[in-house]
């Protein structure tokens, strides 16, 4: 079986180097493994940071990025359950997902919802499981809570908005793009939109007395510091990224980001009954893979039952991939993106 992959050879803000490579797969997957003929490989913001050389947990180049894949199981190795053959599967990959064929441990795959296209199922894996972990493991959202979601037009942000509304919260969603904000307002009527522009940030647009119960912040920098100030008693700010670094490869800017994010004494937070929680899904996946697999199963079941509605994800052809990644890193593409592989399913 022939395998196609996108490999990142060199990182850089303006000129990353990718290689589209073909190779032959072994005759069969190894013991306990299954082979997936990938139909869609999810693209995430972390991949754009890797491309720019701004993701500290990335392997040394060259490597194949990609956190998630969806496709049928076309071969089963020894000691792997034979009933998995033919299963429409989805799985976390941490790295290696930008490939048309992939061998993975049988224990790592989950049945993909039958009612979704492969690109939409990709939107469940990292974005929705991240949202599940943030809003159901690290905290809970109560009916009537005030919830602020930054970067709400991104895949994780949109999933968080949907989750918070389903749990009965009143949501304020932020974006740095007027176009994206309008799209969110149409999708989630009755909620509050905030344009988080450099000259008019979100904290200048809400009354000073308004306090939030939950703030989801993938930005860091001053957004994080202002968020801590805007928590009310019992409130939690959940940080899961540092997107202000995107496009900035500078030790000075990194130091400024840390300074603007603020330094917090746990006792000071305790006295005001405010909390902070952080998440790096890659580390959780390495140390507690069973927990992420639990989340993936829960999300898949909810999608199958129609409880959650992932966006109409946009498929990207192999030939569009490099240009798409550049646009994605600049914030010019929104929603969930996925590489769509067109190879036939035969081995």
Image (spheres, grey):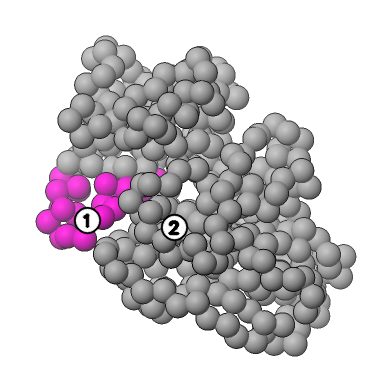
Q: Residue 248 bears which disc, if any?
A: 1
**Residue reaching furthest to the left:** 252
Q: Quadrant of residue 221?
A: top left
Q: Which of marks 1 and 2 is in front?
A: 2
Q: Where is residue 239 in the image (x, y as percent from the top left)?
A: 37, 42
In this figure, what is the number of numbered marks?
2
Q: In this view, does 308 lie to the left or right of 155?
A: right
Q: Where is residue 109 in the image (x, y as percent from the top left)?
A: 70, 61
User: Which quadrant, please, contains the C terminus?
Assistant: bottom right
- Point out the tag, 1 or 2, that comes first from the N-terminus: 1
Q: Nearer the viewer, residue 218 or 272?
A: 218
Residue at 72%, 56% in the rendered image: 110
Residue at 29%, 31% in the rendered image: 196
CA neighbours of label 1 inside 10 A, class few (<14), some (14 to 19), many (20+): some
Q: In this view, does 26 lie to the left or right of 336?
A: right
Q: What element carries label 2?
A: helix
**Residue reaching furthest to the right:** 83
- Magenta extent: 240-259
The image shows residue 195, relative to residue 210, as above or below, that is: below
Q: Is residue 272 left or right of residue 151?
A: left
Q: Position of residue 277 (x, y in %)?
A: 39, 40
The image shows residue 75, relative to residue 295, as above or below, that is: below
Q: Residue 324 bears which disc, if any?
A: 2
Q: Residue 165 bears which disc, if any?
A: none
Q: Main secondary structure of the magenta part?
A: helix
Q: What element carries label 1?
A: loop
Residue 309 seen: yes
User: Which quadrant, please, contains the N terminus?
Assistant: bottom right
Q: Is residue 61 left or right of residue 248?
A: right
Q: In which quarter of the image is residue 116?
A: top right
């Amino acid at each position: 079986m022939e395998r196609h992959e996108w490999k990142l050879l060199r990182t850089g803000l303006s000129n990353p180097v990718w290689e589209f490579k073909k190779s032959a797969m072994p005759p069969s997957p190894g013991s306990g493994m299954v082979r997936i003929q990938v139909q869609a490989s999810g693209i995430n913001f972390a991949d754009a940071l890797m491309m720019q050389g701004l993701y500290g947990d990335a392997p040394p180049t060259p490597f194949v990025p990609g956190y998630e894949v969806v496709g049928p199981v076309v071969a089963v190795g020894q000691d792997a359950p034979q009933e998995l053959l033919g299963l429409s599967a989805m799985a976390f990959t941490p790295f290696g997902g930008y490939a048309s064929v992939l061998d993975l441990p049988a224990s790592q795959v989950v049945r993909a919802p039958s009612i979704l296209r492969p690109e939409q199922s990709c939107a469940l894996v990292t974005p929705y499981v991240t949202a599940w972990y943030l809003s159901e493991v690290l905290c809970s959202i109560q009916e009537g809570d005030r919830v602020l979601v930054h970067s709400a037009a991104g895949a994780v942000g949109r999933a968080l908005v949907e989750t918070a509304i389903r749990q009965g919260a009143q949501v304020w969603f932020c974006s740095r793009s007027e176009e994206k904000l309008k799209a969110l307002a149409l999708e989630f009527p009755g909620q509050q939109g905030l344009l988080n522009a450099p000259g008019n940030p979100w904290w200048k647009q809400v009354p000073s007395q308004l306090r939030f119960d939950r703030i989801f912040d993938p930005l860091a920098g001053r957004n994080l510091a202002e968020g801590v100030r805007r928590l009310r008693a019992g409130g939690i700010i959940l940080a899961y990224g540092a997107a202000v670094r995107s496009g900035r490869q500078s030790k000075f800017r990194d130091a400024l980001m840390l300074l603007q994010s603020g330094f917090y004494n746990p006792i000071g937070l305790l006295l005001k009954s405010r909390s902070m929680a952080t998440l790096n899904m890659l580390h959780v996946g390495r140390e507690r893979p069973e927990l992420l697999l639990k989340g993936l199963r829960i999300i898949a079941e909810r999608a199958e039952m129609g409880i959650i509605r992932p966006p109409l994800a946009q498929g990207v052809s192999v030939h569009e991939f490099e240009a798409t990644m550049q646009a994605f890193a600049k914030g010019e593409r929104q929603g969930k993106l996925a590489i769509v592989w067109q190879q036939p399913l035969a081995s």
